[in-house]
Image: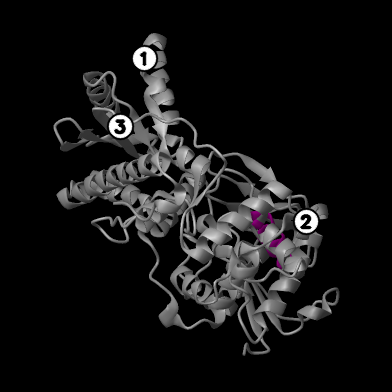
Amino acid sequence: MASSMILLTDDLLLDYARCHRRAYLHREGDRHHRAPEKDFVLKLRREHQQQIQRVLAGQTVVTPQYAPQDWPAGAAATETLMAAGVEQIHRGILRWTAPLEAFPQWTGLELVGRPTLLVKQPGVSRFGDWCYQPVNIKLGKRPKSEYKLVAMFQGLILTQVQATPPPDPQLILREGSSHRVDSGYWLGKMVAAVTDCVAALRGPEPPEVFISRQRCSLCPWYDHCHGVAVAIQHLSLVPGVTPGRYASLQGAGVTSLAQLAVLQPEQVEPEIEPAIAHHLQRQAQAIFENRPLPLGRMHPSRPSLAPIELYFDLEAEPDQDVDFLFGVFCVNHAKQTETFHGFFAEHPRDEPLIWQQFLALLHRYPTAPIFHFSPYEVETVKRLSQRYRMSQYSMRSLLPRFIDVHAWLMQVAVLPVENYSLKSVAKWLGFAWRDQGLSGDQTVCLYNQWLDTADQEAMAMIRRYNEDDCRATHLLRMWLHQWSQGEPGNFSKYP
């Protein structure tokens, strides 16, 4: 049970805006259930600090001195600088513990905000003929709603500290663009978010689990929450069940996998469209019965096994705008041989070299189909063909050879999986990556490690991961070939 006095920081409010359960676990959860921060998260933090340093380069800022997490001392040091009229305060602490008359439901809170900057502006405050504005430098490319909620939270504390409302908070984003947060619009949303957050933090149990692959993947509590969801067969594990659809299903009394597996679309109309409701029912049925189900009356026509087939996957570092590994797994059915080709950019400037090596391999097998998983590979080929001035004739002859096995799968079958990522599908097929736990995000970290240290093992791990992606794509393609050749009921896992 949470204590009556709650320390509510802007970081905790940010966690709540992203996931109600995460905020509760950060404050009340068993630390043994929390995994270490992932390398990719640590990389993002380093990049954020580098971004702040770039923005502040050449500017005069003053940083208050205080011990880590000593909020009273940090707030006192910050207010001393504000009283002195310092132009820009970096990493200042805003703190308020007295009751807020306008928000009696917040009684018992200690509010702490840490804007990147407090910038002196014209105005009148308790400090003199000036006031301060909160400015946050964020790594994101767009002004996300959670950034705005946090900025308004900081602005509310600042209002109490300087005894006057500040100018609208400001966000500075990755590309250097600046965005003003409309206080008139976001104040009410922030108050509602804080009120709900406090109620959740004071609850006897954590908020309900909800698994979202994109949102949860980097959270240190993911394994713990996923285990809880699996144990109760939570509906968020069914692909396609979004938070909004989950609420509609609950409203219709559909709360279990068994109930969803026999759902009739009219049960959730008009909140969920009939076609979507039918798809959710089929997906739940596949999971409940632990077997693949056909999707549609006819399977789209796909090529039979070719003498030679290529399986393509790539690795990229978005921050450096470089595709650093082109992997091609060549399967020769006629000779019964398999060969992996990994074209690796030892430096970002080597991208045009490995692009030409990749094209040379494709041209060596001019009639071989090129299988890949998701549209990203083809989008990259189109982008690089423009960057390196590939002829339109060559592109017109190359593009029809690409076959997206993910799109193929989504047209013909419903699998008993939690999501349709390559890892999830291939795992269901019995495939295992050699480096357990390695992800695409981590290959980005490994590439940066390679650039910094020329660590041969880092490069080897990237190559293994990419080759396993290619082999997993091949495995799925072979399963789809079998699936499309026979009666759906006759199939089990490949091989």
- Determine the CA span between mark 1 and mark 3: 29 Å
Q: Are marks 2 and 1 in contact (CB under 8 Å)?
A: no
Q: Amino acid at mark 1?
A: Met
Density class for disc 1 (Cα within 10 Å; few <14, some 14-19, many ≥20) is few
Question: Residue at label 3?
Answer: 305
User: x, y (%) of residue 96?
Assistant: 70, 76
Q: CA distance from mark 2 to mark 3?
A: 42 Å
* 96 relative position to 339: left or right: right
Q: Which residues are magenta?
A: 146-157
- For disc 2, the marked residue is 266
The total of numbered circles placed on residues is 3
Task: Give the crowd class for mark 2: few <14, some 14-19, many >=20 residues within 10 Å.
Answer: few
Q: From the viewer's perspective, is residue 4 above or below residue 451?
A: below
Side of 355 where 399 appears, left or right = right
Give the mark nearest the N terminus, 1 or 3. Answer: 3
Q: Is residue 355 left or right of residue 227?
A: left
x and y, in percent, of residue 459 in the image: 21, 46
At label 2, the amino acid type is: Glu
Q: Nearer the viewer, mark 2 or mark 1?
A: 2
Magenta stretch, main secondary structure, is helix
- Label 2 and label 1: CA atoms lie apart by 52 Å
Give the camera-side residue of 345 and 178: 345
Instruction: Say if the magenta span includes residue 149.
Output: yes
Relative height, residue 394 to residue 307 (above, below): above
Q: Answer with mark 2 or mark 1, whichever residue precedes in sequence.
A: 2
Q: Is 29 located above or below residue 18 in the figure?
A: below
> At x 70% / y 77%, what residue is drawn?
198
- In the rendered structure, find residue 390 and report the number of the disc placed on it: 1
